[in-house]
Image: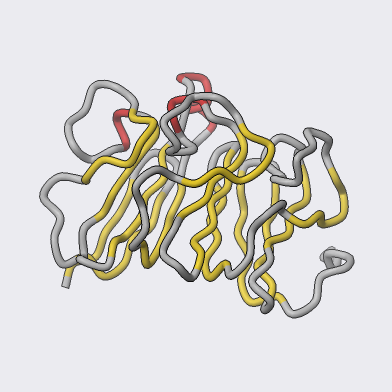
Amino acid sequence: MSVQVPGLTGVTAIAAGWLAGYALRRDGSVWAWGNGGPLGDGDTDSSSVPVRVTGLTDVTVIAGGLGAAYALRGDGTVWAWGMGGAGRLGNGSTESSSVPVQVSGLTDATAIAAGGGYYVTLLGGAAAYALRTDGTVMAWGTSQQLGNGATANSSVPVPVSGLAGVTVIAAGPFNGYAVTG
């Protein structure tokens, strides 16, 4: 049986995270419901109805990850909220945040993707990716998912090795993907 999420109209995109759902509305606002940590409304309580993610406007793309969520704004900046373990918020910290924080150094992103699986949670993290206007990809979070041969997590975006001319990115539970073209 399916049910309509209450209170949402004008939705242009949806994303699923670990225990939370996200909706992007036509007005550029983001709404979340589910498990409290990654809702982005400044609270840590869960919500069975959508709550507005604090402080985000002009959002064009959303992504849900493992205990964290991401938003790309029209100005090319990327914002993250939720669990900070392994540096998955990309702001130079491993602290969690109940409101969106800006991902360090990204001002020219055109797409975002996020991944992570339950087993990765036991190890402490997940990863997120951003496609830049020059066709390169940046990654942050769990070391094995950064695509640069790293053996340490990164709390700030680092270049994915060997990729140029990327047009599309995606993320799975334990890895990232890119289409070059």
Q: As displayed, is residue 5 above or below residue 115?
A: below
Nearest to the observer: residue 177 or residue 12:
12
Looking at the figure, which quarter contains the C terminus? bottom left
Q: As displayed, is residue 17 above or below residue 165?
A: above
Looking at the figure, which quarter contains the N terminus? bottom right
Q: Residue at coordinates 44% horizontally, 26% vertically from top-left?
A: 86
For this view, does 139 lie left or right of residue 122?
Answer: left
Q: Quadrant of residue 152?
A: top left
Q: As displayed, is residue 124 above or below residue 99?
A: above
For this view, does 44 lie left or right of residue 105?
Answer: right
Q: Residue 156: x percent and y percent?
A: 35, 36
Q: Residue at coordinates 46% horizontally, 35% vertically from top-left?
A: 88
Q: Quadrant of residue 56?
A: bottom right
Farthest residue, direction left: 162
Q: As displayed, is residue 174 above or below residue 55?
A: above
Q: Residue 38: x percent and y percent?
A: 67, 40
Q: Residue at coordinates 53% horizontally, 29% vertically from top-left?
A: 84
Q: Residue 178: x percent and y percent?
A: 26, 59
Q: Residue at coordinates 74% horizontally, 80% vertically from top-left?
A: 10
Question: By what rule are the colours in the image chosen?
Answer: secondary structure
Q: Residue 164: x percent and y percent?
A: 13, 61
Nearest to the observer: residue 40 or residue 129:
40
Number of marks in picture: 0
